[in-house]
């Protein structure tokens, strides 16, 4: 089994990973009220970097204040926020592992109360709310262009000031970039709405600006074509994502990676994929690096790494197993995760206290 591709070296951008087990982006609400990470974050990521050559992707991280709207999520804008992240990246690099920052803007899913308390307003591509949520104000064309620059600045901050190895654009799970892509959320009449060509424009401009800021080999992007979470589901994502991934291949062939979530989960809840598949994306993007996330255990990860060539991101198992790459390689049983501590603001419990398999060997 140890001969599986899952446990062989591979490359992402210029980085040599020692295996294909990646930490998925995981929001944990352990930042301060000022959106600064704490030493809990340093310890959390240090632990998960314990197998040398592991790629970690951070929790969603706000590109700027007005792109936020959840309490206790870290941002990557002020000197204080960047200094806190630098401690995290230093700890990861000390373990000879790598870390990308997931760049996040919430758009219509933000909590209006949190936004208001911080002096911001609820915005989105259009005045279409998610089910049961408040109605956002549509961003003006000029504001969309301003957001492109917020992403570029955040990428620059991440790589050139906070020491990250790269950034991942969060264009999945119904957040701002994803909202522009889907026709059910975007009914704009300017150059960012209407046709598929127009709906992908924001994402492509953000990619271009980010690549210009830090280089293609340091930029990845995450999509969830089949997702229901945040009321983002569309009937047929294939034409949209075929066009988008083809454009990305043409314009940014050296992008670090594309990251997809699989239709066997919605958010982190299992569902029947009913024949839905991201293989159409693999067919376009191959042989470039593709990270796949969603519902993986050891056997399925080995199977998909070997048969599809995927790099596998783990969410919940990596929450509960700081030494997950080693446990998978040596087939050591996994700790069970405790869902009740996933989102406990500023709490060490369930964040830095899951045990390693064998403390004495670390
Ligand atoms: C507590 C928690 C927080 C999450 N936060 C994020 C996030 O910030 N960004 C993101 O793209 N996905 C997020 N996800 C989704 C995960 O990255 C992953 O796709 C999902 O958990 C399925 O993988 P798993 O079955 O290995 O857990 C989160 C999932 C969980 C459980």
Image (tube, helix red, strand yellow):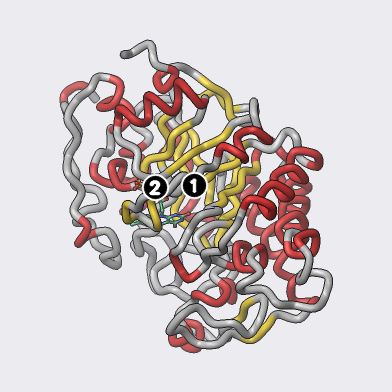
Q: Residue, x 61% and y 74% (percent of image)?
A: 185
Tell which tag, 2 or 1, sits nearer the viewer. 1
Q: Can residue 350 be seen?
A: yes
Q: Residue, x 64% and y 33% (percent of image)?
A: 283
- The residue that label 2 is drawn on is 264
Q: Measure the alpha-carbon separation of dots 2 and 1.
A: 9 Å
- The residue that label 1 is drawn on is 276
The image shows residue 32 at horizontal and vertical percentages of: 38, 68
Q: Nearer the viewer, residue 271 or 55?
A: 271
The image shows residue 45 at horizontal and vertical percentages of: 37, 44
The quadrant in which residue 336 appears is top left
Give the answer, above or below, for where 63 lies relative to 46: below
Give the answer, above or below, for where 52 lies relative to 203: above
The image shows residue 359 at horizontal and vertical percentages of: 17, 29
The quadrant in which residue 92 appears is top left
Q: Can residue 80 be seen?
A: no
Secondary structure state at the residue bearing disc 2 = loop
Crowdedness of circle 2 by 10 Å Cα count: few (<14), some, many (20+)?
many
Which of pointers 2 and 1 lies earlier in the amino acid sequence? 2
Q: Are marks 2 and 1 in contact (CB under 8 Å)?
A: no
Does residue 177 appear to the left or right of 72 in the view shown?
Answer: right
Q: Residue, x 19% and y 56% (percent of image)?
A: 349
Q: Nearer the viewer, residue 158 or 299?
A: 299
The image shows residue 229 at horizontal and vertical percentages of: 44, 65
């Amino acid at each position: 089994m140890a001969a599986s591709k899952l446990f062989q070296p591979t490359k992402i951008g210029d980085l040599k990973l020692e295996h294909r087990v990646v930490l998925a982006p995981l929001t944990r609400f352990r930042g301060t009220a000022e959106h600064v990470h704490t030493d809990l974050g340093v310890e959390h990521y240090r632990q998960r970097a314990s197998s040398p050559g592991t790629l970690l992707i951070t929790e969603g991280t706000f590109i700027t204040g007005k792109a936020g709207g959840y309490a206790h999520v870290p941002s990557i804008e002020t000197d204080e926020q960047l200094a806190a992240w630098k401690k995290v990246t230093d700890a990861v690099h000390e373990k000879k592992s790598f870390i990308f920052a997931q760049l996040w803007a919430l758009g219509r899913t933000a909590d209006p109360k949190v936004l208001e308390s911080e002096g911001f307003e609820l915005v989105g591509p259009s005045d279409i709310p998610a089910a049961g949520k408040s109605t956002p104000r549509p961003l003006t064309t000029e504001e969309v262009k301003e957001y492109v620059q917020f992403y570029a600045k955040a990428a620059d901050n991440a790589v050139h000031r906070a020491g990250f190895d790269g950034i991942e654009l969060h264009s999945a799970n119904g957040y701002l970039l994803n909202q522009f892509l889907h026709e059910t959320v975007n009914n704009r009449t300017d150059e960012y709405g209407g046709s598929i060509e127009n709906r992908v424009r924001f994402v492509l401009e953000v990619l271009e600006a980010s690549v210009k800021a830090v280089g293609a080999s340091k930029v990845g992007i995450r999509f969830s074509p089949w997702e229901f979470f945040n009321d983002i589901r569309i009937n047929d994502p294939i034409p949209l994502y075929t066009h988008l991934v083809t454009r990305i291949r043409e314009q940014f062939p050296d992008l670090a990676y594309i990251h997809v979530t699989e239709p066997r989960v919605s958010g982190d809840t299992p569902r029947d994929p009913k024949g839905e598949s991201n293989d159409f994306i693999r067919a376009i993007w191959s042989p470039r690096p593709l990270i796949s996330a969603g519902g993986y255990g050891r056997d399925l990860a080995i199977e998909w790494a070997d048969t599809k060539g995927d790099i596998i991101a783990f969410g919940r198992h990596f929450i509960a197993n700081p030494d997950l790459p080693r446990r998978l390689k040596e087939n050591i049983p996994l700790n069970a995760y405790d869902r009740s501590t996933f989102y406990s603001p500023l709490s060490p419990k369930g964040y830095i206290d899951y045990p390693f398999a064998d403390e004495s060997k670390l």
